[in-house]
Amino acid sequence: MAQAPPPFDPELAAALDAVGDVRPGLTPQDIQAARQALAPDGAGGPDLTMDGAFAVEDRTVPGSGGAPGVSLLICRPTAPSGGTARPVLYYAHGGGLVVGNNRLGVDTALPWAKELGAVVVSVEYRLAPEHPHPAPVEDVYTGLLWTAEHAGELGGDPERIVIAGASAGGGLTAALALLLRDRGGPRPIGQMLMYPMLDDRNDTLSAHQMAGVGLWDRTANETAWTALLGDRRGGPGVSPYAAPARAADLSGLPPAFLDVGSAETFRDEVVTYASRIWQAGGVAELHVWPGGFHGFDALAPEAALSRAAHTAQLNWLRRLLGR
């Protein structure tokens, strides 16, 4: 019998209540409606230029092995760089592997980039279930290779690339770090994993605790992982490049930042992943935000806990980049 879930932070609970009827249990039948709800309408959405601080460009780069081209959203600071190559933040969006595009969540990375004078490259990957594993992670990998090879053209430094992602994008970012290590690709200087989706087995205590609660629960998780893996989900032999929690070896990875809410489905798998990085001799900074539900900082960015999370993320990047 599952234990009672931890309570939400009161300020976050009020923000969640204000949204109204929230259904955390995404089902396969909900995917198309969720995609339509996130589809651009040509008018809304954040100002990606941040009042002219960035020049915004869409570019499609060649896919690998006959795969379709990969769409990249490139945001370059308009202020002079002083002749110094800029750091690059390579971002993978969330959306449970089944919804979203390269504009989803990029407004999280842009404030970091404005503070740090960095270039942002946000990758769009093929979505499941139409494109199961390995399509999403291979697109993310292809986009990173292009970014590293063309960093100078973007005003960026190929030796100072930070890979980052939230939720499903955080899981893909963790998988990207593993792929780059194992294939001998470019080495990012850090990986930022914000409430990452890491484990297809969906059987942690926190996954059971948070069933039917918050913004993403065990039912939604099952829907997403089944879309990616089909009947392989939860079984033997799942690739760590699909579900990074399956990796036997977490040594030799870039320094990691991980954060997660105490009141969310992914809590236990994220804490375990950070612990395993330490056990493998690696570097990781872990934050477990008390009373945070999945995606709390995006839903309620002005809440005190959200501001604390954003500050911790930016401070880690500053230390990583020596700024």
Image: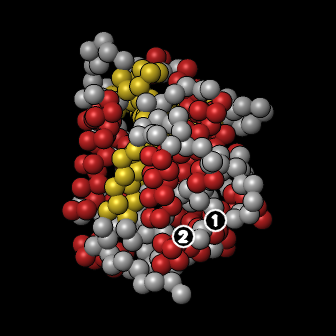
- Tag 1, which secondary structure? loop
Q: On the image, numbered disc 1 is attached to which residue?
A: 201
Judged from this view, the residue extending furthest toward the top is: 83
> Residue 204 bears which disc, if any?
2
Looking at the image, residue 276 lies above or below residue 260: above
Q: Amino acid at mark 1?
A: Arg
Decide if residue 215 is on the left or right side of residue 49.
right
> Where's residue 272, x and y in %?
48, 58
Decide if residue 196 is on the left or right side of residue 231.
left
> Residue 154 bears which disc, if any?
none
Q: Which residue sits at x=59%, y=75%?
A: 219
Observer able to see residue 124:
no
Instruction: Compute the Cα span from label 2 to label 1.
Output: 8 Å
> Where's residue 109, x and y in %?
37, 43
- Tag 2, which secondary structure? loop
Q: State the residue in front, 314 or 27.
A: 314
